[in-house]
Amino acid sequence: MQTAFVIGGAGFVGQHLVRHLAAHGMRVLATCRSTASASPVNGVEWVPSDLAATDASKNWPTHYDALIYLAQSPRWRDFPAAADDIVRVNVCALQQAAEHARHAGAKRFIHMSTGTVYSQTREPAREDEPIRTDASRSFYAATKLAAELLVAPYYTSFGVTQLRLFMPYGSGQNDKMLLPAIVSKVRSGMSVDLHGADGLRCNPVAVDDVSEVVRRCLMLDGSQTLNVAGPEVLTLRQVADAIGKTIGREPRFNSKPESPPVIVGDTSRLRATLGWQPPTRFVDGVRDWLKSLGG
């Protein structure tokens, strides 16, 4: 039986992933802030860990086949006040994880990064495009890019897969994220702000599809960087309309005279590497998501 060690297993993506891996017959070890706050899951063993601590790895298991790093600072938006915490979790604990995986004999290391590391928002982002280090980006995105650079050289010890995630959605997501915030606005009758007439373009991905991407990546050889995004490119207006149809409320909009950004990940390399890509259309994913919330 293959053993996966998931760091950040109690977070949004993590809570879906640990269930998914356990359901596919894997032994799953996963970190949480405290075992008292972690929900019991069949096939999942919880490991208490403070990822912001200098000795974050003190309770980690001594052997596993793959390490999956999902963790990010819960204060990732609170810059500069939480800069130290963001760096500790997104960068320092990641480096501890890479060293730990090396000593534990892991064969694969999966790092969940973000599509916001890209330096352009004019067209769909491709993994082989140059990323300007001097481009304007959030502190969070800067730490994720730094983490990618730090873990990449460990390919000499194990296969490294870096997954750049584009706009995931589903149950358990923080209500301050973009898509839950749009749901809240549509429900309450508040206007959804748009850049231009239709707003930004994006290809949101259902969190269950993200879990399946990670599972399939555990079977890869070598090292790779892959975008993880949904199968459809939608405008923010279309996203809000789909949400409105699901909850039975017409969305309201407020258009601003600004050029809409493109937050789209090209998934050609993902499809070629896995022979598969996330299949869930947004209208279906959002229906299942909101049904799980009772509305």
Image (cartoon, helix red, strand yellow):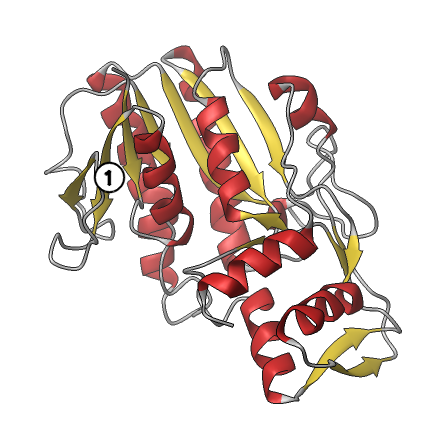
The answer to whether residue 29 is above or below residue 119 is above
Identity of the residue drawn at 67% across and 44% down: 230
Which residue occupies the foreground of this view, 23 or 14?
23
Q: Residues within 10 Å of mark 1 (few under 14, many from 20)?
A: many
Which image quadrant is residue 186 in?
bottom right
Question: In the rendered image, is residue 55 in sight?
Answer: no
Mark 1: which secondary structure? strand
Percent x, y for residue 263? 72, 53
The answer to whether residue 291 is above or below residue 223 is below
The N terminus: image quadrant? top left
Which image quadrant is residue 180 in?
bottom right
The answer to whether residue 34 is above or below residue 212 is below
Question: In the rendered image, is residue 78 in sight?
Answer: yes
Q: Which residue is mark 1?
A: 30
Percent x, y for residue 173? 45, 61
Give the residue type that dot 1 points to.
Answer: Ala
Identity of the residue drawn at 71% across and 71% down: 245
The answer to whether residue 22 is above or below residue 191 is above
Identity of the residue drawn at 59% across and 88% down: 188
Q: Is residue 50 left or right of residue 285?
A: left
